[in-house]
Amino acid sequence: MAETRLPPRVPSADTAYVDDGLIASRWDNEDLLDAGRGAIVMGTHDVEQARHLANQAICAWFGSDLAARRPERGWWLFGECSGVLAWLNDPEKGREGVLFTAEPKEQQS
């Protein structure tokens, strides 16, 4: 039986979109003091390159009325902080990336 491969831009649950070596992953802190949600794009510090992929992922995960806003460059690592799993900015162990918050499209960043 032949292996069925998904197109690279189709997210598998909450995991990731992949495009030209960039990986977008979902983050969601709405259960913690309404802190927001969005996408983190790993593999670049170029905000505009990352925003394109983040917008696609945010639209798929959270709805087409939202867009990637408030970019934050960092060296990101998925780890534990005070007993909660989270994306941490760790310049020593992290990977280059840009974190975006999902906000209504009519808002400007």
Image: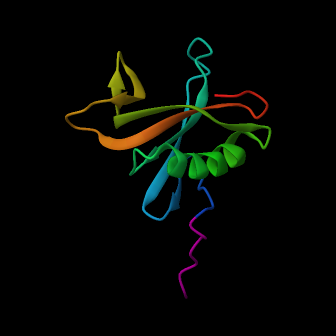
Residue 15 visible (yes or no)? no
The residue positioned 60% from the left and 62% from the top of the image is: 9
Q: Quadrant of the N terminus?
A: bottom right
Image quadrant where residue 94 sits: top left
By secondary structure, the bulk of the magenta-drawn segment is best described as loop
Task: Judge from the rendering whether residue 85 lies leftward or rightward of residue 68; answer left or right.
Answer: left
The residue positioned 62% from the left and 21% from the top of the image is: 30
Task: Judge from the rendering whether residue 95 lies leftward or rightward of residue 23; answer left or right.
Answer: left
Classify 9 as above or below 80. below
Classify 7 as above or below 39. below
Residue 26 visible (yes or no)? yes
Q: How many labels, in total?
A: 0
Q: Position of residue 5 (x, y in %)?
A: 56, 75
Task: Judge from the rendering whether residue 64 lies leftward or rightward of residue 75; answer left or right.
Answer: right
Q: Position of residue 91 (x, y in %)?
A: 24, 32
The residue positioned 78% from the left and 44% from the top of the image is: 64
Q: Is residue 4 magenta?
A: yes
First to last magenta residue range: 1-8
